[in-house]
Image (cartoon, helix red, strand yellow):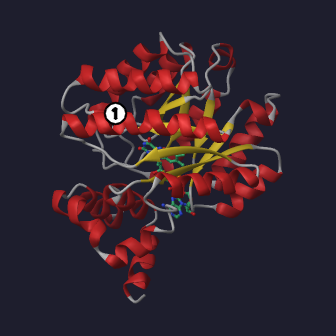
Amino acid sequence: MSLARTALLKISDNQWLRENGTRLPFVRRAVSTFMPGESFDDMLVAAKATAAEGIGSVFTRLGENVKDLAEAEAVARHYVEVIDRIKAQGLQCEPSIKLTQLGLDINRDLAYGHLRALAASAQAAGSYLWVDMEQSSYVDVTLDLTRRLKQEFPAVGVCLQAYLFRTRQDLEDVTSRGIGVRLVKGAYNEPPNIAFPKKSDVDANYLALAQLMLSAGPRAAGARAVFGTHDLDLITAIRNHANSVGLKAADYEFHMLYGIQKAAQLRLAREGAAVRVLIAYGEYWFPWYMRRLAERPANVWFVVKSLFG
Ligand SMILES: Cc1cc2nc3c(=O)[nH]c(=O)nc-3n(C[C@H](O)[C@H](O)[C@H](O)COP(=O)(O)OP(=O)(O)OC[C@H]3O[C@@H](n4cnc5c(N)ncnc54)[C@H](O)[C@@H]3O)c2cc1C
């Protein structure tokens, strides 16, 4: 892992900066590359614009490690309310949530109660519910709660991270239950005893796991196959593999983040691929934004430029 990536991921965990970093005007200017604005309405405008370009969307209200019961409840209420608003707009825009934003650090049952309420609301709206994956200490509980949810709600998927050694086993388990998978490389700072330290190994594992997701077992179980990546070489390799095993473009999807590889998003959509963009909003964006900088430390240049207006 590069020093710059490690440093930015450490900054993302700094409590003082998490609370105060968003007030720095030049950081606020720089983050606009990756999020259309802080409000749900800003997200909605962006989702409508991408829909007009033939690209679906996924939305998330930024926040994590909520330590206050009332705040966790307010987050759950917010999601239920906006899922209804999205339905009223007729938009293909699916929620993606972090369990620690629903109060997982305070009480597991409470977080599950909120998750269940969101799944019920998504189901009533004819939508799918995505569960994000956070640091490795949350993987077991995230998978347990997702498996429990799936017993009641069919349209549920979870994010899995290709940098973790354990992911092949997790992927086999969740896909056998028909749980959708959004495969990503992984955005956190993980130690070498549980995660591949070398990027080339993460990339190779990603492709091997992608091929597994497109194989007969997961497909027969009805597990939705989503590739959350901006890596154009990997995307080409996945499409070539899918073609070689006789799959259609509609059998799998690519999800990217708002503001990243926009030209590739449009090209893929034009070529008939199923593409969605994940649009984030909310006031608590500092740790999320630091992870975006860590993915491409050259992005720090945007921050430096915005310092000078
Ligand atoms: C839809 C979606 C959902 C995600 N959900 C989660 C999650 O729940 N948990 C989790 O741990 N991670 C999540 N991630 C983040 C993911 O783990 C990676 O950190 C991130 O996607 C970068 O990896 P990459 O696959 O794009 O490949 P990389 O090899 O990092 O990037 C490939 C190329 O994409 C471009 N690129 C990538 N990132 C950036 C960036 N920030 N700014 C500018 N260009 C960039 C660059 O051109 C780069 O060369 C998600 C990502 C996506 C797309």
Which residue is at the front of the view, 287 or 245?
287
Check mark 1 vs ligand 1: CB closer than 8 Å? yes or no. Answer: no
Q: Residues within 10 Å of mark 1 (few under 14, many from 20)?
A: many
- Whether residue 48 is visible to the viewer of this picture, yes or no, is yes
In the rendered image, the vertical position of residue 254 relative to residue 102, given as above or below: below
Residue at the image point whose x is 56% and y is 57% from the top: 258
The image shows residue 216 at horizontal and vertical percentages of 69, 17
Which residue is at the front of the view, 221 or 210?
221
Disc 1 marks a residue whose amino acid type is Leu
Residue at the image point whose x is 57% and y is 52% from the top: 44
Quadrant, the N terminus: bottom left
Which corner quadrant of the image does residue 211 belong to?
top right
Q: Which residue is mark 1?
A: 99
Which corner quadrant of the image does residue 240 belong to?
top right
Q: Farthest residue in the top direction?
A: 151
Which residue is at the front of the view, 118 or 147?
118
The image shows residue 219 at horizontal and vertical percentages of 67, 19
Q: Callout 1: helix, strand or loop?
A: helix
Quadrant, the C terminus: bottom left
Which corner quadrant of the image does residue 231 belong to?
bottom right
Residue at the image point whose x is 25% and y is 33% from the top: 103
The image shows residue 198 at horizontal and vertical percentages of 42, 51
